[in-house]
Amino acid sequence: MVMNSVYRVIISTLVLNQCIAYFNVDNHDECFCQLSGNIDECTCNIDTVDHFNNVKIYPRLKSLLLKDYFRLYKVNLKRPCPFWLDDSRCAMKDCHVKPCPPEEIPEGLKEDMQPKVVHVDPQPKRKYSKMVNEDCATHHNDLDYLNKTISEKLQKDLQMWEAHDDALDNFCDIDDDDENAEYVDLLLNPERYTGYAGPSAHRVWKSIYLENCFRPKKSFNFNPYIQSNKLNELCLEERVFYRSISGLHASINTHLSAIYLLSKNNGFVLGKDEEKWGPNLEEFLKRFSPETTNGEGPNWLRNLYFIYLVELRALAKAAPYLENEEYYTGNDSNDWDTQMAMKDLLHIIRSFPDHFDETSMFRNSEQADKLKYEFKQHFRNITRIMDCVGCDKCRLWGKLQTQGLGTALKILFSGKFDGITQFETLDSHNKKEFQLQRNEIVSLVNAFGRLSNSLYKLDDFRQMMRERM
Ligand SMILES: *[C@@H]1O[C@H](CO)[C@@H](O)[C@H](O)[C@H]1NC(C)=O
Ligand SMILES: *[C@@H]1O[C@H](CO)[C@@H](O)[C@H](O)[C@H]1NC(C)=O
Ligand SMILES: *[C@@H]1O[C@H](CO)[C@@H](O)[C@H](O)[C@H]1NC(C)=O
């Protein structure tokens, strides 16, 4: 695995160089693979991050995220969109969410645990969208199918998890305590192309950029994104916010292009066995090449590196806490393995020499409080917009990744984690203060895993670009 990664890095460096050479020769001086040099707002450069991620971080995360602790994410996917009439279900042509058959639910779960763990609502009722649902019910789009199966063994374990977490007496987030929240197995529902597109998907991103990001005073709203040469009109904190959102967007688009449904037949999806998934270079180019993005694609990819560094730094900052977390699943030997794997990962993360420096933010004290407040409001709002995503699978991953980013921002800017180097030495009151909830940890590590995966997949696309030349 490591050898393989080393090999990939060497290849990617070669490709990168060749790519630059190629484009220079041809006088196209813009290409998505031209990325090099420093990452904005940070002192480290792209090559360093590529190497660090692909060789050291990616392989470790890949095995870590298979652990039970990290694969089960608790989420409420049934909240109605608070901002506009949710007419998006038709975009997916599928309203069907398969419930767990009653006989698969253990007795103990059927009563009070039931709403938390299993989804038994055969027809998801979204406000206003009933008619639309009925209209759509005749179509099927397997791409958005969310497999909510949880093995009987795990369902039993989940009761123990809940009991364990409740006993910790940490304050509850609204979402986590939500009685409609249920566990979803992330490994059964990989983030990949779903066909979710068109006005509904567009509207989600548009409202995030136009209504929930800071914008330069005289910006025109033809394009939801901010042109990179206008970004300097924003202050550092506002740019950091914008870059994080843009980086998240780029990461999601990279995944959708990297796991694309390749075999289709007249627009009808073939039977499950015949589905073929893989990278789609055309899709990637459409989303990122300068020709189709008004020259902005490469900047969006740079923002992907940026958000990677933000979450990397958050993990490093919370490391004293995370190293002491139990990663409780009730199986001592598994929990021990998870804890060791986390310690190993955190050790590597801490060794990264050029961490993002969050201490340069919110310094001007007069402005800082107001700005911090706005930062928080904007971000909260974005997590609520995720309830307007009209495709279950996209909503699942959208919520997970925004919660992960939110946790990272909380670690970096709440002040709670400042100056903590040794968790053991804290008294019990302070220990409680620094506590992160299970779902915050699960979302942060998985969100970072998604970014790590995106950087890794970028290499595949560089390779494909080269083969094509
Ligand atoms: C859902 O996942 C379970 C467990 O892997 C599998 O047995 C089942 O066939 C899946 N359901 C569908 C419809 O793919
Ligand atoms: C929250 O987002 C909605 C939808 O984009 C927008 O209309 C509203 O102004 C936002 N509110 C805040 C406080 O940012
Ligand atoms: C814990 O998990 C391991 C690996 O999945 C398994 O072999 C072992 O039997 C489990 N132990 C208990 C006590 O369930």
Image (cartoon, rainbow, N blue to C red):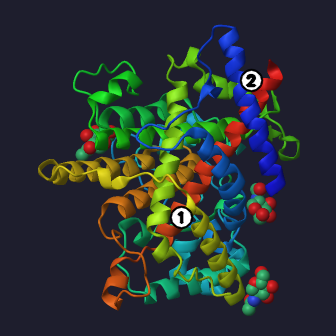
Q: Quarter holding the N terminus?
A: bottom right
Work out whether 433 lies above or below 281.
Answer: below
Place of residue 226 in the rendered image (x, y in percent of width and height, measured from the top left)? 38, 27
Mark sitting on residue 140: none
Quadrant of res 391: top right
Label 2 sits on what residue type?
Gln
Residue at 77 percent of width and 32 percent of height: 463
Mark 2 lies on residue:
18
Nearer the observer, 257 or 421: 421
Place of residue 422 in the rendered image (x, y in percent of width and height, measured from the top left)? 43, 80
Local secondary structure at mark 2: helix
Label 1 sits on what residue type?
Arg
How many C-alpha atoms fall within 10 Å of the one at disc 1: few (<14), some, or many (≥20)?
some
Mark sitting on residue 350: 1
Residue at 72 percent of width and 75 percent of height: 104
How many C-alpha atoms fall within 10 Å of the one at disc 2: few (<14), some, or many (≥20)?
some
